[in-house]
Amino acid sequence: MTRIRKAVIPAAGLGTRFLPATKAIPKEMLPIVNRPAIQLIVEEAAACGIEQVIIITGRGKTELVDHFDAHPQLEDTLRRQGKDALLNEVLRTTDLARIVTVRQQRPLGLGHAILCARDLIDGEPFVVFLPDDLIDADPPAARQLIDVYERTGKSVLALMEVAPEAVSSYGIAAGQTRPEDDRLIDIDTLVEKPPAGEAPSNLAVVGRYVLSPRIFDYLSQTRPGRGDEIQLTDALARLALNEGLIGDRFTGSRYDAGDMAGYLLANLNWARKEPRLWRKVKRWLAENE
Ligand code: G1P
């Protein structure tokens, strides 16, 4: 079985939900404590053994690439000042993975964004990370999916139960639970953002996918769907029917960094890992409740 070495991060969106903060900086650069959200995603990829990360970008996204590039002037200054801890943090950003970018020329949808990586993926299985979905999990969520892929040889996506009124914000999957492992579902139905009441289940697709390169054939045949965009979910529905697709109810906490409350909660979650910072946050919360 081909080892998974490549990942795709679609990051071409305009981030309109965070305007005006995202007028001049990409939404993926908004910080979660002291790291931009995209760094958390690339760190998850690196922790899963990913060596090459293909970021799908658009106009106004150059900071994403700068962030993972070396910055000799800053490094020299930190070195001279003896700020070793900060220097290591800065150096680490350049060592996580090889970053390459492709520009999505037109905003034709998530499916189209993934299709832009076809040549660079070059026939290998790969992981897709949606950068709005920040997942705190051990092992990392994508690692959990790769394990399922390695056991089954099939494409895998992450699933999470959501409230019935939330189904219209997600791709929704349904299928048969595997008797030997009730975390896994053989998916036979996938619908992008169904209206509440018409969803086949309340199992939502979360932004981690391990995909066979054959997804590109399906994507190239997929016509615009929900929102008049080429949807990854529609191509996955065809992949599920023809080759099989597994849903993994992964373990971990997922934060929707594309939503204001989710973004703030993600900050609190990662702040909790810094004892000195967390003590101050807790004190503030206690005083202001
Ligand atoms: C995308 C996918 C959707 C998935 C969601 C997870 O939607 O199209 O199927 O459930 O990510 O976050 P978006 O939130 O980008 O509109």
Image (spheres, rainbow, N blue to C red):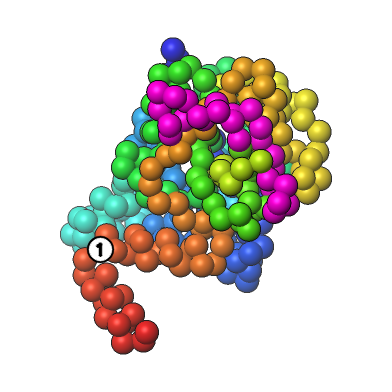
- Look at the image and say whether residue 196 sits in the magenta stretch: yes
In the rendered image, the quadrant that contains the C terminus is bottom left
- Give the main secondary structure, helix, strand or loop, of the magenta stretch: strand
Residue 105 visible? The answer is no
Instruction: Answer with the quarter of the image where residue 228 lies.
Output: top right
Instruction: Please name whichever residue, 88 or 285, is drawn nearer the observer in this view of the structure.
Output: 285
Please state the horizontal and vertical placement of residue 94, each as a whole percent of the image.
Answer: 37, 43
Q: Amino acid at mark 1?
A: Glu
Residue on which disc 1 sits: 274
Q: Residue at x 27, y 60 (%)?
A: 273
Image location (x, y in percent) of residue 117: 62, 30
Q: Residues within 10 Å of mark 1 (few under 14, many from 20)?
A: few
Q: Is residue 223 visible?
A: yes
Q: Quadrant of the N terminus?
A: top left
In the picture shown, does residue 86 fall above or below 101? below
Q: Secondary structure at mark 1?
A: loop
User: Number of marks in the image?
Assistant: 1
Left or right? Give the position of 280 relative to 189: left
Whole-percent x, y for residue 29 in the image: 50, 57
Residue 24 in the image: above or below residue 172: below
Q: Residue at x 50, y 62 (%)?
A: 262
Residue 34 in the figure: left or right of residue 132: left
Q: Quadrant of residue 120?
A: top right
Q: Which residues are magenta?
A: 174-199
Viewer-closest of 47 and 12: 47
Q: Residue at (44%, 46%) from the top-left corner? A: 41
